[in-house]
Image (tube, rainbow, N blue to C red):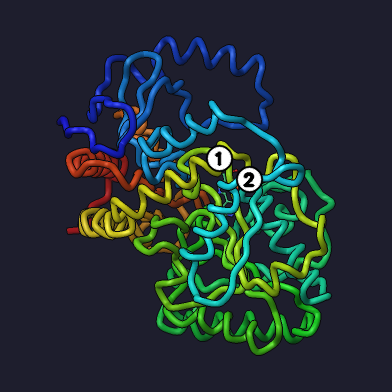
Amino acid sequence: MTTPARPVGGPAQPQLRRLVTEIPGPKSQELLARRNESVAVGVSTMLPVFVTRAGGGVLEDVDGNSLIDFGSGIAVTSVGNSAEAVVARATGQLQRFTHTCFMVTPYEDYVAVCEALAELTPGDHPKKSALFNSGAEAVENAVKIARAYTKRQAVVVFDHGYHGRTNLTMALTAKNMPYKNGFGPFAPEVYRVPMAYPLRWPTGPEHCAEEAAAQAISQIDKQIGAQNVAAVVIESIQGEGGFIVPPAGFLPRIAEYCRANGIVFVADEIQTGFCRTGDWFACEHEGVLPDLITTAKGLAGGLPLAAVTGRAQIMDAAHPGGLGGTYGGNPVACAAALGAIDTMRSEDLAGRARKIGETMMPRLRALAQRHPEIAEVRGRGAMLAVELVEPGTLDPAPQLAAKAAAFCHAAAVVVLTCGTYGNVLRFLPPLVIGDDLLDEGLDVIDQAFDAVLTNTKS
Ligand code: PLZ
């Protein structure tokens, strides 16, 4: 049951699953009662175990339980929690200064992060970056920049897409509940087109890439006019929408259409970026070259930092002073990002993500063989999911996803759900998780499905 802590996994901490109370335990329940009195209802909590320490592949709670982490705080702690290099660099920075505001008096690490982004993102054309605090802010700024560059207004997004919770990004996000309901009016000049979703494509997955791209392009041409479109914004693999992997050919076709029509192609790599899918960025898988790329989450090992990176001539289209924010590119977050990037490089975490996928994928496929409720196992690298349906149909079965997740949680394995229909169980382990913990987490997932899904394929 134990795995030695990996060196980059943060504070020396036993790498094991340990249940000493029910989940949530009594101390967590006390804190939950306080939370419910003081924290707004709108901010939800999926699993109310209050964390005291985390590192490698585990989260420890106030009751002394140790949970296997298959969530990474929604794809953030890819390098592990409190990863050594992140802590060292951020601590050093904390001791030197915490803030000056880059727009007032700058500091080197902001520049170093932008240099690293230019180097790591696809393409060897001249690139520039601007730094922000959250993914949503990065996406908003990518739209601002694309509008300034093209002098056009329309923004095209896709079914099932997720881009954030601010006013503009709510408009870009597809799903009403819980993200948008009652929060309108939404920003204008946002248009949604079909997404290539192979499992649910009416004429079958083999036609999906071509037909979905043709439909999307035809809608843009007929309903908006390419000449009015500033940007097409798309996740290279959709995250919150259900880990929907676009079939081969779809992204290149959309990117090509953008190039031919002077539209800024924005890859939202906030969830997929920084080694998660086995490449530095998921768009590299098909050699797609975005004009702008938005990143956050994995970039800074748990500190809030986000970026827009892209072609220098596009990035420079916003006038001096047109982009920014008090905290954007905070020095502690930048130091953390440099530590996280060093770790990803030195530990080859992209390779590790591929290895995790090679371990998990066959186990999940074997599970799908046993359970007809699993309509599809999909994802790439360490970004994997199963979609649950009523057997023999494509009717979403969100209650099964919820039950399987609840079983895992009770057994001290943190898994998340997602999907437009809430019927997808997703797995996002830290990339530094040990093999033993990975296997043990998979064992628990097996048990969860065996317990929750009564049907079995003969
Ligand atoms: N773009 C592709 O995945 C954030 C959302 C969690 P922020 N995804 C997690 C929730 O319910 O709020 C995300 C993303 C993609 C943009 C964002 C937004 O990033 O840092 O949450 O603003």
Q: What's the mark number on residue 329?
A: 2
Q: Quadrant of the C terminus?
A: bottom left
The answer to whether residue 404 of the structure is visible from this angle is: no
Vertical arrangement, residue 217 with respect to residue 375, above or below:
below
Q: What's the mark number on residue 333?
A: 1
Q: What amino acid does circle 2 point to?
A: Gly
Vertical arrangement, residue 256 with respect to residue 59, above or below:
below
Where residue 245 appears, as percent x and y from the top left, is 44, 67
Residue at image coords 46%, 29%: 47
For mark 2, give the secondary structure.
loop
Where residue 397 appears, as percent x and y from the top left, is 45, 51
For mark 1, give the secondary structure.
helix
Q: Quadrant of residue 172?
A: bottom right
Q: Is residue 83 left or right of residue 254?
A: left
Q: Is residue 270 left or right of residue 341?
A: right
Q: Quadrant of residue 15?
A: top left
Residue at image coords 65%, 14%: 37
Residue at image coords 61%, 50%: 135
Q: Are discs 1 and 2 less than 8 Å apart at CB?
A: yes
The answer to whether residue 311 of the structure is visible from this angle is: yes
Q: Is residue 413 left or right of residue 316?
A: left
Q: Quadrant of residue 60?
A: top left
Total numbered circles = 2
Pick whichever, 209 or 303, lies toward us: 303
